[in-house]
Amino acid sequence: MPVKADFVIVHANELLTMRGASERPKVGDEMRDLGIIRDGAVAVRDGRIVAVGTTKEVLDRVEKGFELVDASGKVVSPGFIDAHVHLVFKGTREDELEMMIEGKTYLEIKRRGGGMPRTLRLTRAASLWELVEETKKILDLMLIHGTTTIEAKSGYEMTFEGEIKQLEVIRTLNKIHPIDLVPTFCAQAIPPEWEGRGDEFTREIVEKWLPEIARRGLAEYADVFCEVGFFNVDQARRILVRARELGMKLRIHADWLAHSGGGELGAELGVVSADHLIHTPMDVIDRLAAKGVLGVLLPTTPFCYLGKYANAREIIRRGLPIALGTDLSAINMSESMQMMMTIAALQMKMTPAEVFTAATINAAHSINRAHEIGSIEEGKKADIIILDMPNHKFIPFHYGVNLVEMVFKNGKLVAEKGRLVQ
Ligand SMILES: [Zn+2]
């Protein structure tokens, strides 16, 4: 059947299709299969992918009257999907990183007026439009580095009005920015004014915040920071169970700083994603896998907290599907999935193919979008990037620079050679 196309990307040295994994994420050795087509081509019409194959196969099928995009010597991949982003905040904490380099602990930094309370204070004082402006800069950088969809969390105000404001910022940006944002309400911390009253604070979230967030349709997911000094397992369970009753899907911050029970709770509730998994015992990884949970690993977090990495090799061996995210936050500022993928490969020993799978189709599963994005297959959205590198193994080999040359979002060229295309 001949097809009409607006444009056709041709002669990709490697076209990474990620095909055949829209129903369930890739696990174990499947993560190494990128469905590569050599001398690959992809045809796009009205924002959708209409043909995929070798350049000859696709050009034989497409009717005349399309534009050609030459990807000779380059890699064509689905747009990157960032599975874990603390998006909305005011103020940065680079001075705290310096203190950590000099050996100060988080508690010492907090005593000196730093840490999460500082970000809460600054973000609460910012207006919605101030936050929209600040956050738009982050999204612009993500886009020129090849990210086309992100999971976007609130959580940096932890007041009723503040969290609604943050989710409104995400909603506003979703309308005005090319990147698609999947909104998550994140119970990220117990703020100073509630210190020592975690149970009462949890009741406030369960009885007042969640119903209002649901009524306004502001969050698709709910997430809880389940760690010692944050929400305990019982409090996290109460928040997640109520969120589910109100129609939200679930994710959890599990076992980042210590084995705190977040992994067990994630398995018990069958959350969509359990994130970090640095201190999770392997029998709990097995339970998560058995419940169909997806693990989101966040290698830039230990990278810039100078900490321990998740045991990605063993987690993959045990059959838990893995996605990757930047965990961008007020203390971890990198918009680049390429940088994060490099750290995943070099520090967690994931192969280049595994990091591509985890940053595309498996990340799409982590936000329930795998039928729309995450692979280059007919019918999917044309979220496609062209990387100026001859094969996918250049990540992590050629690092610290932006290898993304062109970014197409919904079939529209939105970034080229490190600049936004207006
Ligand atoms: Zn996080």
Image: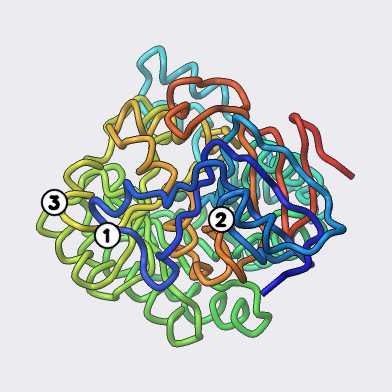
Q: Nearer the viewer, residue 77 or 174?
A: 77
Label 2 to label 1: alpha-carbon separation: 43 Å
Q: Quadrant of the N terminus?
A: bottom right
Mark 3 and mark 1 in contact? Answer it, CB < 8 Å.
Answer: no
Going by the picture, which residue comes out furthest to the left?
Answer: 283
Q: Which mark is residue 399?
A: none
Task: Give the residue displayed 35% in from the left and 76% down from the top.
Answer: 238
Q: Nearer the viewer, mark 2 or mark 3?
A: 2
Q: Is residue 248 above or below residue 103?
A: below
Is residue 236 visible in the rendered structure shown here? yes
Q: Give the amino acid at mark 3.
A: Pro
Query: x and y percent of residue 271 in the render?
Result: 35, 71
In screen coordinates, is 212 left or right of 103? Answer: right
The image shows residue 25, relative to residue 279, as above or below, that is below
- Secondary structure of residue under mark 3: loop
Residue of label 2: 53
Count residues near mark 1 (Cα–Cα under 10 Å), then give few for <14, some for 14-19, many for 20+. many
Give percent across and percent down for residue 168. Answer: 73, 65
Q: Which residue is mark 1?
A: 262
Q: Is residue 289 above or below residue 229?
A: below
The residue labelled by disc 3 is 281
Identify the mark nearer the N-term, 2 or 3: 2
x, y percentage for residue 31?
A: 32, 51
Residue at the image position 56 percent from the left and 41 percent from the top: 39
The figure's colour scheme reads rainbow
Tell me the amino acid under the disc marked 2: Gly
Q: Earlier in the sequence, mark 3 or mark 1?
A: 1
Q: Nearer the viewer, mark 2 or mark 1?
A: 2
Disc 2 element:
strand
